[in-house]
Image (cartoon, rainbow, N blue to C red):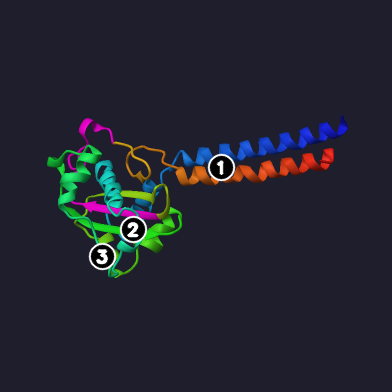
């Protein structure tokens, strides 16, 4: 009985420790639980630090940014300045991207800049911004362009996994009138996350939390084996 009591005490301690950690993580992520939102926050912080204006986060434009990613069909090699580099045709914005997002085609406004990057591993949004999207002087020129008034960002893996695409679209439209979403509610799509949609898109964080459960389970089994001589 003494051995059983010891095992239960250790097991309960592990459970409460894990629960406490999860509560802490969840509470913190309620604030910024979407990597696309975090990407926009990093972008606007950088702009204002260089005496630029903070851009309106337009969910309609952000949804289109996610559609822009999906057009690459997981081909990381098609992103960038290499021989295989490509980008979706401008006609796709009205013909495909807008309808898929429920964005009124008549509310589309010119895209004033695009930033796109792809990596084989997932990195935090702030790192994606500084290391993946800010590749050269051209990227900085796009970031600080004074013609931008709004922004939309999206993050997605191919079939929910590697490679990971990061996309930012800029526009000179007017807030609440350009890239207007029919019915006023953004269409949430998976896989992928886009900014401004009040969507707690935390698939990467959820995976990390699930993986953290395994060490606790392993310790519990080890304790049981030691106590009961299994």
Residue 152 seen in the current view: no
Residue 191 seen in the current view: yes
Question: Residue 95: within the magenta?
Answer: no
Coordinates of residue 181 in the picture (x, y in percent): 22, 36
Lower position in the chain sequence, tag 1 or tag 3: 3
Residue 81 vs 169, above or below: the answer is below
Residue drawn at x 17%, y 38% as measured from the top left: 104
Q: Is mark 3 on a helix, strand or loop?
A: helix
Coordinates of residue 41 in the picture (x, y in percent): 37, 50
How far, Cα to Cα, is label 3 from label 2?
26 Å
The residue singled out by tag 1 in the image is 210
Q: Which span is picked out in magenta?
A: 164-186
* Mark whose residue sits in front, 1 or 3: 1
User: What is the count of numbered marks?
Assistant: 3
Circle 3 residues within 10 Å: few <14, some 14–19, many ≥20:
few
Circle 2 residues within 10 Å: few <14, some 14–19, many ≥20:
some
Q: Is mark 1 on a helix, strand or loop?
A: helix
Q: In which quarter of the image is residue 143?
A: bottom left
Direction left: furthest residue = 106
Q: Is mark 2 on a helix, strand or loop?
A: loop
The residue singled out by tag 3 in the image is 141
How far, Cα to Cα, is label 1 from label 3?
40 Å
Residue drawn at x 33%, y 37% as measured from the top left: 188
Residue drawn at x 82%, y 43% as measured from the top left: 226
The residue singled out by tag 2 in the image is 75
Residue drawn at x 17%, y 39% as measured from the top left: 177
Residues at circles 1 and 3 in contact by the CB criterion of under 8 Å:
no
Lower position in the chain sequence, tag 3 or tag 2: 2
The N terminus sits in image quarter: top right
């Amino acid at each position: 009985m003494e051995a059983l009591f010891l095992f239960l005490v250790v097991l309960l301690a592990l459970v409460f420790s894990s629960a406490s950690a999860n509560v802490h993580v969840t509470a913190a992520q309620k604030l910024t639980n979407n990597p696309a939102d975090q990407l926009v926050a990093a972008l606007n912080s950088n702009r204002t630090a260089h005496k630029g204006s903070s851009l309106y986060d337009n969910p309609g434009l952000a949804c289109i940014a996610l559609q822009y990613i999906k057009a690459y069909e997981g081909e990381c090699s098609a992103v960038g300045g290499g021989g295989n580099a490509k980008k979706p045709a401008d006609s796709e914005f009205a013909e495909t991207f807008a309808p898929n997002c429920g964005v009124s085609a008549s509310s589309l406004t010119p895209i004033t800049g695009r930033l796109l990057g792809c990596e084989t591993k997932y990195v935090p949004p702030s790192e994606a911004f500084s290391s993946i999207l800010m590749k050269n002087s051209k990227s900085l020129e796009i970031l600080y362009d004074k013609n931008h008034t709004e922004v939309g960002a999206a993050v997605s893996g191919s079939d929910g996994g590697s490679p990971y695409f990061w996309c930012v679209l800029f526009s000179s439209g007017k807030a609440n009138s350009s890239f207007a979403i029919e019915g006023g509610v953004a269409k949430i799509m998976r896989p992928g996350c886009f900014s401004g949609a009040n969507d707690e898109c935390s698939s990467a964080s959820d995976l990390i939390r699930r993986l953290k459960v395994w060490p606790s389970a392993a310790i519990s089994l080890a304790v049981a084996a030691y106590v009961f001589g299994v």
